[in-house]
């Protein structure tokens, strides 16, 4: 993912009022609710490769993962949909909005306990990057897994939130408005009737009738637990959209052409995919500047009834 693409996304989050007043780690208090360590989340004994004993000792939880995360580590959460977890314990992984590409600002020091509240997912010394999953070097020299440049963390709990202890716990989601789960892309490549197109994948936000929605602060007003499955459904573009990341299909139009809504802090796979803000404040995926939609009469994978409507086209690759 390009530096510019990530930077644009960070600027969108920075524009929200929640981010302006938050401390660097929001809740990296010394008073944290910490569970008893387990064999894979150890205290003191396991040292992240690339660190000295002295620099690793401040971490109260250490998880070292040998291989890169993969599709096998995506778990379907009952409330949040498909999210990324670690290999050892199937615990939820998070990204921090105040990190920048390939740089973690969540550390352990005399003034901050951020990395004890949010333990990094360390990479083994022999680990190799693969696809979207890279390895960054932390300030103390340890290696940490990252997704499209953003470092990955667990949630260890703080004074107001219990820690994630078992698979399915997502207590760290939206803490301080700056911590987010990691989601796979809600679209996939497919071939329908000999044409290479994009189709929906997994579940997306269900915001209800587009005409009835008005969002001023996505962080507080979007309900990430309200979802609908779009797996395999054909995606379309609107010829009347100008191609500059703007949708002119709003209100009644969007009732028949539901947008491919984007989750909070979605991370695009490259410059071809972007996230736009619709007239009602919701977020929508776009491909090469053209917003992506479904057709309400397509009910199963392979349906392309939307091609019968003038000025609408398959989202071709």
Image (cartoon, grey):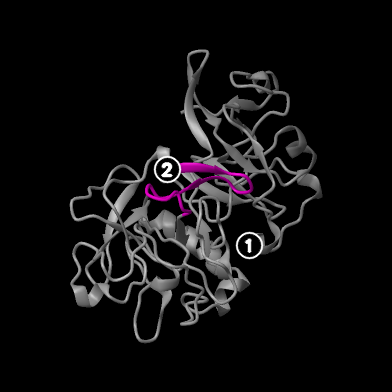
Residue at position x 31%, y 46% from top? Answer: 68
Identify the residue position indicated by label 2 in the image.
Answer: 73
Total numbered labels placed on residues in the image: 2
Q: In this orientation, which residue lies closer to the viewer: 186 or 6? A: 186
What's the distance in space between the residues labelled 1 and 2, CA to CA? 26 Å
Q: Start and end of the magenta stretch?
A: 73-92
Q: Name the disc covering residue 219, or none.
A: 1
Taking the image as shown, residue 144 lies to the left or right of residue 203, namely left
Q: Residues within 10 Å of mark 1 (few under 14, many from 20)?
A: some
Q: Position of residue 317 (x, y in %)?
A: 46, 28
Q: Position of residue 121 (x, y in %)?
A: 35, 58
Q: Position of residue 200 (x, y in %)?
A: 56, 32
Residue at position x 52%, y 13% from top? Answer: 193
Residue at position x 20%, y 62% from top? Answer: 49
Is label 1 in a helix, a strand or a loop? helix
Image-quadrant location for residue 272: top left
Q: Would residue 41 be counted in the magenta stretch?
A: no
Image-quadrant location for residue 81: top right
User: Which sits earlier in the primary sequence, circle 1 or circle 2?
Assistant: 2
Q: In this orientation, which residue lies closer to the viewer: 28 or 251? A: 28
Outermost residue, bottom side:
110
Is label 2 in a helix, a strand or a loop? helix
Taking the image as shown, residue 257 lies to the left or right of residue 236, namely right
């Amino acid at each position: 993912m390009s530096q510019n693409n990530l930077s644009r996304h960070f600027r969108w989050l920075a524009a929200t009022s929640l981010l302006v007043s938050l401390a660097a780690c929001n809740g990296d208090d010394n008073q944290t609710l910490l569970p008893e360590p387990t064999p894979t989340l150890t205290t003191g004994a396991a040292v992240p490769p690339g660190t000295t004993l002295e620099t690793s000792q401040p971490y109260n939880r250490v998880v070292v993962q040998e291989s890169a995360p993969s599709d096998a580590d995506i778990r379907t959460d009952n409330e949040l949909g498909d999210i990324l977890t670690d290999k050892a314990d199937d615990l939820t992984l998070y990204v921090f909005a105040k990190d920048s590409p390939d740089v973690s600002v969540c550390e352990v020091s005399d003034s901050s306990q951020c990395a004890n509240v949010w333990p990094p997912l360390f990479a083994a010394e022999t680990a190799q990057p693969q696809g979207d999953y890279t390895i960054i070097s932390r300030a103390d020299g340890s290696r940490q897994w990252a997704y499209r440049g953003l470092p990955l963390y667990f949630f260890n709990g703080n004074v107001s939130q219990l820690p994630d202890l078992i698979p399915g716990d997502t207590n760290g989601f939206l803490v301080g408005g700056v911590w987010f789960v990691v989601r796979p892309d809600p679209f996939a490549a497919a071939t329908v009737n000999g044409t290479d197109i994009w189709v929906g994948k997994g579940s997306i936000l269900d915001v209800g009738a587009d005409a009835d929605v008005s969002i001023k602060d996505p962080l507080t007003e979007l309900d990430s637990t309200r979802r609908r499955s779009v797996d395999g459904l054909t995606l379309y573009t609107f010829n009347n959209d100008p191609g500059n990341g703007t949708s002119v299909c709003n209100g009644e139009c969007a009732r028949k052409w539901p947008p491919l809504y984007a989750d909070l802090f979605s991370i695009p796979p490259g410059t071809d995919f972007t996230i736009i803000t619709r007239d009602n404040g919701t977020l929508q995926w776009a491909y090469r500047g053209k917003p992506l939609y479904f057709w309400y009469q397509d009910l199963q994978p392979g349906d392309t009834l939307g091609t019968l409507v003038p000025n609408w086209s398959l989202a071709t690759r």
